[in-house]
Amino acid sequence: MQDRLDADATHPEDAARAAARAKRAVLVIALAQLLGTSLWFSANGAMRDLQVAWQLSASDIGWLTNAVQAGFIVGTLLSAITGLADRVSASKVFAVCGVLGATLNALFALCSSGLASALAFRFGVGIALAGIYPLGMKLLVTWDPKRAAQTLALLVAMLTLGTASVHAIRAMLATVPWQTVVLTSSVLAVIGAVLVFSLGEGPHARRSANRRSGLSAGIGEVLRIKEFRAAALGYFGHMWELYAFWTLTPLLVQHAFASGTPAAPSTVAVWSFLIIAVGAAGCLFGGRLSRSVGSARTAALALTISGTLCAIYPLTNALGTGVQLALLLVWGISVIADSPQFSALSVKACPPDKIGGALTLQNSFGFFLSACSILWSTSVYHALDVRVAWLLLPGPIIGLIAMRPLFRKQPRW
């Protein structure tokens, strides 16, 4: 693959123009990812309002989050089974799903009468997100495949900011109805869809030649690759922790303030935004670190730090609000920094025409595990309080064990 890329840019001026165009495209895709993934946690940005309006418990909020996760799982499985991720233009799928997700998110805000109807709309949003997140990763590779670890780090950084953005919107629009907060994320997603549709696919796009290739053909092939399996298993351990932590973040912030002056909803929203959004810096730092130590070691370092925080955070009650918030910020940095590195390792391990399906399948099973951890942790939060962090610890531990085959080759990007 590298030889082909080098052959495409033998003339210095052509190579410079291609590099500049690729850089602009990467920035556009990253921005579109930020805007599109604001749909993901739009309900969590209105958590306090929904708890009052619909008398929701922490477990009910977990179900709202899990409805999106379940939709995402179904959407990614359908994409992998049909081979859609490798047979159709990634930019078109991204754009259509962005508009679809924005519409369903708006219906959630305007038409939901309670938890049951909200779950249906949020499930649909999850299906749409299956055409945004993994296809955004594939789209980046079509523009700049030689710097996958760094560009994917930027993309996941934007996913992190997109996830956190609803808390920032809630903080800025503290006095408006929760529906306005949710509708704002729909507008952002439509803008992201337009940006990607206007951009199109990159010059290194590869489509599957087999029109019938799907789960049984393409995915069966990549599952036989040892390096892909190791990267995927490490990613699964990471996913057990990640989305459960993001879902629990507002509750952990509320608990941190419980020993002192109770925090206003806007204060909880600001701190929730900061704790999630700071993960974008972790992704970018991880992308830089991977240049010198490799993606596998970078991912292992992040897993080690976040796993350590899973273990020690429940023991920090007596240390005060400031220390707890500081630890949550460090946790927010490390909990997502490994994600783009796992994706980069999977991209490196797979044939070019199987990347879309492989990433889609990896995301599908990873989000299934995240749904299980969200359901479990939010269901027992009322009984365990911050000790719920111990339920997330098996993810980093199992992920580190699964990654051992990757350290033998120490792949670098």
Image (cartoon, rainbow, N blue to C red):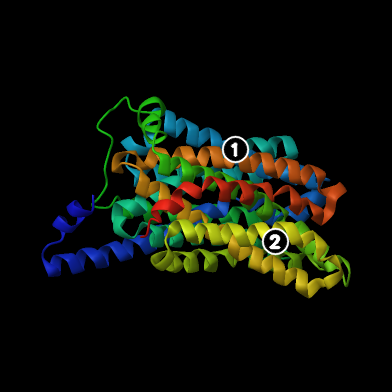
Q: Residue 283 carries which label?
A: none
Label 1 neighbour load within 10 Å: few <14, some 14-19, many 20+? many
Q: Residue at x 41, y 44 (%)?
A: 227
| Amino acid type, callout 1 | Phe
**239 or 294: nearer the viewer:** 294
Q: Which residue is identified by label 1? A: 368
Mark 2 or 1, nearer chain start = 2
Give the image location of residue 45, x and y in percent. 68, 56
The answer to which image quadrant residue 5 occupies is bottom left
Q: Does residue 193 show up?
A: no
Q: Is residue 308 visible?
A: yes
Looking at the image, residue 205 lies above or below residue 413: above
**In the displayed structure, would residue 329 be above or below residue 80?**
below
Mark 1 residue element: helix
List the residue tagged with mark 2.
Answer: 309
Looking at the rendered structure, the kind of residue marked 2 is Leu
